[in-house]
Image (tube, rainbow, N blue to C red):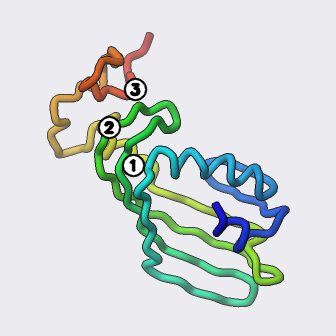
Amino acid sequence: MAVVDETCAADVVVHGITESTGIDDYKRFIGPVYDAFPDKHAILDDMIVEGDKVAIRFTETGTHKGAYMGFSPTYRKVTIRGVEIDRVAGGRFVEIWSAVDTLGFVQQLGSMPTPGKESGGIDPRRQGSGKPGDRTLISLENK
């Protein structure tokens, strides 16, 4: 988390999967990501800088080893792609807009079927039992 302190303003505003205001709020959001994906690695695929804005296309990889957003660990290696536009002032990020492929992420965890691919035995229509090996993470049934 030291990199967040070094690169973000104390009053950074983040827009995306969650809205956060302030560096502590932002760290509360991203902390669980690093807990659930301890080997998380990011690659900056493209970066464009113009004025006070930085546009980034990135690829992140990691192994799902901890609970995250209601998903039990699957121990699957996942790859997530996204785009971020940041506003910089005083050499620090002051505003961040982020969009990631959330659907692709949950499909890789096995909680949603991927069209045209085998589901690996996971039936997304049934509720998970919570037992080891039961990788059903969400239910699509109407109750």
Query: How far apart are the alpha carbons under marks 2 and 1?
Result: 12 Å
Q: Is residue 2 above or below residue 140?
A: below
User: Where in the figure is residue 44, as x and y percent of width and height?
Assistant: 47, 77
* Whether residue 53 can be seen here: yes
Task: Name the residue beneath numbered marker 1.
Answer: 105
Which circle, 2 or 1, is nearer the viewer? 2
Whether residue 112 is visible here, answered yes or no, is no
Circle 3 Cα neighbour tier, 10 Å, few/some/many (<14 / 14–19 / ≥20): some
Q: Are marks 3 and 1 in contact (CB under 8 Å)?
A: no
Q: Residue at x 44, y 52 (%)?
A: 38
Which of the two discs, 2 and 3, labels the residue nearer the N terminus? 2
From the viewer's perspective, is 99 left or right of 87?
left
- According to the image, label 3 marks what residue? 138
Query: Relative to 100, is 17 above or below?
Result: above
Q: Position of residue 131 (x, y in %)?
A: 30, 18
- Looking at the image, tell me whether mark 2 or mark 1 is earlier in sequence order: 2
What secondary structure is found at the residue carrying circle 1? Answer: helix
Whole-angstrom CA distance, mark 2 to mark 3, is 13 Å
